[in-house]
Amino acid sequence: MRQLILIVFLSAIPFLNCMSQNQNNMKNQIKEIVASIEKAAANRNIKQLTELLHKDYRVVANRFKGSKNVTIIPKETYLQMMKEKKVGGTNYNINVKDIKIYEHTAIVDVLYISETTSDMHKYLVLIQDQNNQWKVVSDIPIVMD
Protein backbone atom coordinates (compact mmCIF):
# COMPACT_ATOMS: atom_id res chain seq x y z
CA MET A 1 0.00 0.00 0.00
CA ARG A 2 2.81 2.41 0.85
CA GLN A 3 4.43 1.68 -2.49
CA LEU A 4 1.16 2.44 -4.28
CA ILE A 5 0.81 5.77 -2.47
CA LEU A 6 4.43 6.63 -3.27
CA ILE A 7 3.98 5.73 -6.94
CA VAL A 8 0.79 7.82 -7.20
CA PHE A 9 2.47 10.73 -5.45
CA LEU A 10 5.59 10.58 -7.65
CA SER A 11 3.44 10.24 -10.77
CA ALA A 12 1.49 13.37 -9.85
CA ILE A 13 4.57 15.60 -9.48
CA PRO A 14 5.17 16.10 -13.24
CA PHE A 15 1.45 16.84 -13.71
CA LEU A 16 1.47 19.43 -10.93
CA ASN A 17 4.68 20.93 -12.30
CA CYS A 18 3.07 21.21 -15.75
CA MET A 19 0.01 22.92 -14.24
CA SER A 20 2.27 25.36 -12.39
CA GLN A 21 4.23 26.15 -15.55
CA ASN A 22 0.97 26.72 -17.44
CA GLN A 23 -0.23 29.14 -14.71
CA ASN A 24 3.11 30.99 -14.90
CA ASN A 25 2.86 31.18 -18.70
CA MET A 26 -0.67 32.59 -18.45
CA LYS A 27 0.42 35.10 -15.81
CA ASN A 28 3.24 36.27 -18.06
CA GLN A 29 0.84 36.60 -21.00
CA ILE A 30 -1.54 38.62 -18.84
CA LYS A 31 1.26 40.90 -17.62
CA GLU A 32 2.21 41.54 -21.26
CA ILE A 33 -1.41 42.38 -22.13
CA VAL A 34 -1.66 44.80 -19.18
CA ALA A 35 1.60 46.51 -20.21
CA SER A 36 0.45 46.69 -23.85
CA ILE A 37 -2.87 48.28 -22.86
CA GLU A 38 -1.10 50.88 -20.73
CA LYS A 39 1.22 51.80 -23.62
CA ALA A 40 -1.64 51.86 -26.14
CA ALA A 41 -3.70 54.15 -23.87
CA ALA A 42 -0.70 56.41 -23.23
CA ASN A 43 -0.19 56.73 -26.99
CA ARG A 44 -3.93 56.80 -27.72
CA ASN A 45 -3.39 53.91 -30.13
CA ILE A 46 -7.00 53.12 -31.03
CA LYS A 47 -6.09 50.27 -33.38
CA GLN A 48 -4.08 48.41 -30.74
CA LEU A 49 -6.70 49.03 -28.04
CA THR A 50 -9.41 47.69 -30.35
CA GLU A 51 -7.44 44.44 -30.61
CA LEU A 52 -6.63 44.15 -26.88
CA LEU A 53 -10.08 44.96 -25.52
CA HIS A 54 -12.91 42.45 -25.69
CA LYS A 55 -15.89 43.45 -27.84
CA ASP A 56 -17.98 43.78 -24.66
CA TYR A 57 -15.33 45.81 -22.77
CA ARG A 58 -16.62 48.20 -20.10
CA VAL A 59 -15.08 50.74 -17.77
CA VAL A 60 -16.94 50.73 -14.46
CA ALA A 61 -16.11 53.96 -12.65
CA ASN A 62 -17.76 54.07 -9.23
CA ARG A 63 -17.70 57.55 -7.69
CA PHE A 64 -14.78 58.37 -9.97
CA LYS A 65 -12.94 61.60 -9.08
CA GLY A 66 -15.55 62.73 -6.55
CA SER A 67 -18.66 61.84 -8.52
CA LYS A 68 -21.59 60.51 -6.51
CA ASN A 69 -22.59 58.02 -9.23
CA VAL A 70 -21.35 54.97 -11.04
CA THR A 71 -20.47 55.52 -14.68
CA ILE A 72 -20.32 52.60 -17.10
CA ILE A 73 -18.49 53.33 -20.33
CA PRO A 74 -18.80 50.81 -23.19
CA LYS A 75 -15.90 50.09 -25.53
CA GLU A 76 -17.16 52.29 -28.38
CA THR A 77 -17.61 55.30 -26.09
CA TYR A 78 -14.23 54.71 -24.45
CA LEU A 79 -12.47 54.59 -27.84
CA GLN A 80 -14.34 57.73 -28.96
CA MET A 81 -13.24 59.50 -25.76
CA MET A 82 -9.70 58.37 -26.56
CA LYS A 83 -9.97 59.87 -30.07
CA GLU A 84 -11.28 63.12 -28.58
CA LYS A 85 -8.36 63.12 -26.09
CA LYS A 86 -10.70 63.07 -23.10
CA VAL A 87 -8.97 59.95 -21.74
CA GLY A 88 -5.56 58.42 -22.24
CA GLY A 89 -2.35 60.18 -23.10
CA THR A 90 -0.74 59.65 -19.68
CA ASN A 91 2.30 57.43 -19.23
CA TYR A 92 2.06 55.21 -16.19
CA ASN A 93 4.47 52.82 -14.58
CA ILE A 94 2.52 49.72 -13.77
CA ASN A 95 2.95 47.43 -10.80
CA VAL A 96 0.97 44.20 -11.02
CA LYS A 97 0.10 43.34 -7.42
CA ASP A 98 -1.80 40.10 -7.99
CA ILE A 99 -3.22 37.89 -10.70
CA LYS A 100 -5.92 35.33 -9.98
CA ILE A 101 -6.66 32.85 -12.77
CA TYR A 102 -9.47 30.35 -12.94
CA GLU A 103 -9.68 28.44 -16.19
CA HIS A 104 -10.36 31.10 -18.86
CA THR A 105 -10.90 34.07 -16.57
CA ALA A 106 -8.41 36.27 -14.73
CA ILE A 107 -8.61 39.18 -12.31
CA VAL A 108 -5.63 41.51 -12.16
CA ASP A 109 -4.92 43.91 -9.31
CA VAL A 110 -2.60 46.58 -10.68
CA LEU A 111 -1.26 49.98 -9.64
CA TYR A 112 -0.81 52.70 -12.24
CA ILE A 113 1.78 55.20 -11.03
CA SER A 114 2.34 58.58 -12.72
CA GLU A 115 4.69 61.47 -12.12
CA THR A 116 2.26 63.96 -13.72
CA THR A 117 -1.21 63.00 -12.48
CA SER A 118 -3.00 61.03 -9.77
CA ASP A 119 -2.08 57.38 -9.40
CA MET A 120 -4.74 54.75 -10.00
CA HIS A 121 -5.50 51.36 -8.59
CA LYS A 122 -7.27 49.18 -11.16
CA TYR A 123 -8.99 45.86 -11.17
CA LEU A 124 -8.94 44.38 -14.65
CA VAL A 125 -11.00 41.36 -15.63
CA LEU A 126 -9.64 39.38 -18.55
CA ILE A 127 -11.15 36.46 -20.40
CA GLN A 128 -9.77 34.17 -23.03
CA ASP A 129 -11.60 34.36 -26.33
CA GLN A 130 -12.33 31.41 -28.62
CA ASN A 131 -8.71 31.61 -29.89
CA ASN A 132 -7.35 31.52 -26.29
CA GLN A 133 -6.23 35.14 -26.56
CA TRP A 134 -6.56 37.16 -23.35
CA LYS A 135 -8.80 40.22 -23.72
CA VAL A 136 -9.76 42.82 -21.12
CA VAL A 137 -13.52 42.77 -20.62
CA SER A 138 -13.77 45.05 -17.57
CA ASP A 139 -11.70 47.89 -16.14
CA ILE A 140 -12.51 49.21 -12.68
CA PRO A 141 -10.34 52.28 -11.92
CA ILE A 142 -9.93 53.87 -8.50
CA VAL A 143 -8.11 57.22 -8.40
CA MET A 144 -5.67 57.51 -5.52
CA ASP A 145 -5.30 61.11 -4.31
Image (tube, rainbow, N blue to C red):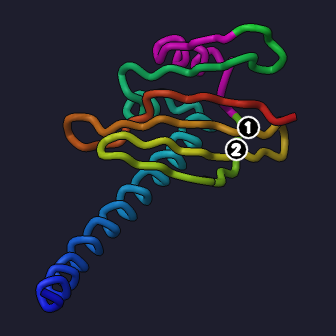
Residue 49 is a magenta residue: no
At x 39%, y 19%, the residue is 56
Mark 2 in CB contact with mark 1 (< 8 angstroms): yes
Report the residue marked by disc 1: 120
Q: Furthest-bottom residue in view?
A: 3
Which label sits on residue 22?
Answer: none
The span shown in magenta is 70-89
Q: Amino acid at mark 2?
A: Tyr
Residue 78 is a magenta residue: yes
Please tell me whether mark 2 sits on a helix, a strand or a loop.
strand
Q: Count neighbours of disc 1 (C-alpha within 10 A) and say few if under 14, some if 14 to 19, many if 20 or more.
A: some
Which quadrant holds residue 6? bottom left
Q: Amino acid at mark 1?
A: Met
Report the residue marked by disc 2: 112
Q: Quadrant of the N terminus?
A: bottom left
Q: Count neighbours of disc 2 (C-alpha within 10 A) and say few if under 14, some if 14 to 19, many if 20 or more.
A: many
Q: Quadrant of the C terminus?
A: top right
Inter-mark Cα distance, 2 to 1 = 5 Å
Residue 115 locus on image (x, y percent)? 83, 46
Res. 48 visible in picture: no
Q: Is residue 59 left or right of residue 9?
A: right
Q: Furthest-front residue in view?
A: 1
At x 18%, y 83%, the residue is 5
Q: Earlier in the sequence, mark 2 or mark 1?
A: 2
Residue 42 locus on image (x, y percent)? 63, 37
Please tell me whether mark 1 sits on a helix, a strand or a loop.
strand
